[in-house]
Amino acid sequence: MLSVRDLDVFFGDAQALSGVSFDVAAGGIVAIVGANGAGKTSLIRTIAGMHRPAQGSILFNDVDIAGWPSHRVCNLGIGQVAEGRQIFPTLTVGENLEMGAMLPRARRKRAAQLDRVFAMFPILKERLRQTAGTLSGGEQQMLAIGRCLMGAPDLVMFDEPSLGLAPAIVQDVLRTIRELNREGLTCVLVEQNVALSLKLADRAYVLENGRVTLSGPGAELLADDRVRQAYLGM
Amino acid sequence: MWSIYLNVVTQGVLTGLVYGLMALGLSVIFGVVRVVNFAHGEFAVIAMYAAFILFKAYGLDPLIAAAPIALAFFAVGFVLQMVLINSFVSRPEHEQFILLVGLAIIITNALLMIFGPDAQPTNLPYAFDSYLVGPLIIDKVRVYAATAAVAVSAALFAFFRRTRTGAAIRACADNLIGAAVVGLNVKRLYALTFGLGLACVGAAGGLMVTIADATPSLGPAYTLLAFTIVIIGGLGSMSGALVGGVLIGVSEALAGFVIAPSMKSMFSFALLIAVLVLRPQGLMGKKKA
Ligand SMILES: Nc1ncnc2c1ncn2[C@@H]1O[C@H](COP(=O)(O)OP(=O)(O)OP(=O)(O)O)[C@@H](O)[C@H]1O
Ligand SMILES: [Mg+2]
């Protein structure tokens, strides 16, 4: 479904990604693991069309979308639950959800998607007219996921969805991701909780200083000594 | 005796609402695109000349002409943002400043070349009609112009509050990364915003010819006026622009009546300084977190 080849991304003179290649099969969950500053967010944002790569290709269903603007990428069905949630704090919960469904691909499915989001997160329906900035961290993360689903995506990239949340809510969020995946959503998952994300993933990639240094099935990486030492503290 | 002051204040309020509409355009553009339109007043003066010409050549009432002028200004603003200003949005502020001040200078000098420096009065047939309300004698033109200004402002408020596109524009102002994340076409929404901002100026300028005579040198004065109003009302606050407009309108009218018309700006600036000292975020502005 998604196939990234030899991606180079620069911020000014600093290289954030060098020669990154990875694949996501339809219906799978792919985990991307790496230390702070490894380039995980840069990778997701480049795929999403928020950064322009200097080099390389991003094939989504065989269309090269490298360098496309984000609204065109989204309209192909690539969604993002961004790092830091990136909700619209002064807009209401309802307006935030609507903003997820502004593109042509999502407009007709708006009502159905909204029902689906409410079924998944009933709290959002209760808070519909409240401004999003007044929600708790966990509720904001639900809103970020709900807003993304409003776009009727085929692939969703989750960037640290559990960052800053209470442990009980972290479980909820990860359970939601697994459920969405069972319903057919293809997922890319960046998660600080490496053990959990590797357990969840079919395939995983380790990113170090903007390079892929290791890849394989999630379970295999979970057993790998280098991964256990570097990311699991064992 | 009292009724004279009441008359002056009423006049100030009515004029101030038209000022407010003009400032609203500046406020909306800055609040969303984060670019200060240093050519704002100059655009208002273009609209004044447009209304003046439409009246002289076709006898079109400026109160009606304001609508097509606003529409044309919307188109100009949209295109200007698309082809020019979008590429300056992420550049340093001094470069934006030079771009827009340059535009302002070009506009003022083009107007000088075409129309000359003299003030051009639009002599409306009903310019001196007035309503008598109790002790008040209110100019008809001002009532019409202020009503139109309030109607346009209300329409803009409704657009931002009630429509999806309006919400999308607010979303861009709220969180630009979030806007890219959900795939909003930010450049197009910015163009729409700049267009709406110029439509406000276009409408306000068209209405203004019923109150003031068109002359090129009004451009910089109106830019300054719109700034003063927006800062008093609160940067980025839409209701603040109208409140600020009314305050400046009243202060100008009172200063002009009590002291001398040439002193009116001094009082506006005194008001500006008072607000900056006592409430730096402006009357209706939110404190930066
Ligand atoms: N907009 C930017 N401008 C300049 N440098 C950037 C920008 N965004 C990221 N970087 C740099 O690129 C490198 C990779 O950052 P990135 O945010 O992609 O890492 P990450 O793996 O997501 O880290 P974290 O776990 O902290 O989220 C870092 O050195 C960072 O400082
Ligand atoms: Mg990151």
Image (spheres, coloured by chain):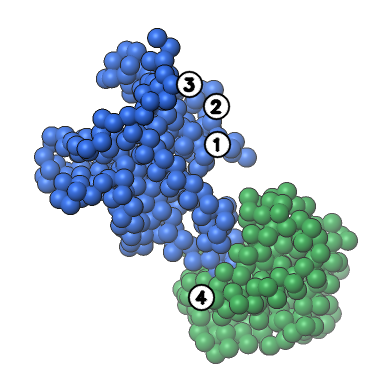
Chain colours: A green, B blue
Q: Is residue B162 above or below residue A73?
A: above
Of labels 1 and 2, earlier in sequence is: 2
Can residue B246 be spotted in the picture?
yes
Q: Chain of mark 3?
A: B
Mark carried by residue A72: 4
The answer to whether residue A20 is left or right of residue B20 is: right
The mark that comes first in sequence, 3 or 1, is: 3
Q: Does ligand 1 reach within 8 Å of label 3's beta carbon?
A: no
Mark 3 and mark 1 in contact? Answer it, CB < 8 Å: no
Q: Are marks 1 and 2 in contact (CB under 8 Å)?
A: yes
Going 77% across and 61% down the picture, which residue do you hit? A125
- Which residue is tagged 2? B279
Position in image of residue A118 (x %, y %): 77, 68
Q: Residue furthest bottom?
A: A62
The residue indicated by pointer 3 is B274
Q: Position of residue B260 (x, y in %)?
A: 29, 15
Q: Are marks 3 and 4 in contact (CB under 8 Å)?
A: no
Residue bearing mark 1:
B285
Q: Earlier in the sequence, mark 2 or mark 3?
A: 3
Q: Of helix, strand and loop, which one carries label 4?
A: helix
The chain under label 2 reads B
Q: Residues within 10 Å of mark 1 (few under 14, many from 20)?
A: many
